[in-house]
Amino acid sequence: MLAQTYETTSSGLGIGILIVYAVVGLAILGFQIWFITKIMAFDEPTYTAAGQNRTLWIVLGVVGLCCSLWWVIDLIWWFAIKPKLEQAPGGMPQAYG
């Protein structure tokens, strides 16, 4: 009787952990999609004026997600590249909607 209770509890715990991982994974994927749209909001001439490459940052965002380094790339872009883009001529992001 005790063994049955233990099996039920452990499989319930396993399903709970699986649900938590799925929710966190979907949240990270959603955040990264939102982040890539932020990267794409600035046009190519703005990136060129700031000395950056738009395609490179989009690829880095996707590769970073696959390699679990998404947060490092996001922080670099957000605090180092985005201010340069905003100060470049035509640096206001385009509206997506």
Image (spheres, rainbow, N blue to C red):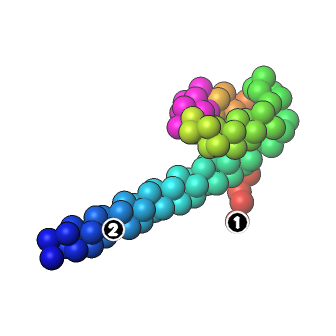
Q: Quadrant of residue 84?
A: top right
Q: How many marks?
A: 2
Magenta-drawn stretch contains 91: no
Q: Quadrant of residue 61?
A: top right
> What residue appears at the point 75 percent right and 39 percent down from the top-left corner?
59
For marks 2 and 1 on the same chain, the one whose residue lies earlier in the sequence: 2
Locate residue 53, reporting x and y percent. 80, 30
Residue flagged by tag 2: what amino acid is it? Ser
Q: Main secondary structure of the magenta part?
A: helix
Pick out the residue farthest to the top. Answer: 51
Instruction: Inspect this view and state whether residue 20 appears.
Output: yes
From the viewer's side, name the closer residue of 6 and 96.
6
Above or below, comparing residue 67 to residue 1 in the picture: above
Which mark, residue 80?
A: none
Mark 2, residue position: 11
Locate residue 46, reporting x and y percent. 79, 35
> What residue appears at the point 58 percent right and 29 percent down from the top-left corner?
76
Residue range corresponding to the magenta coloring: 70-80
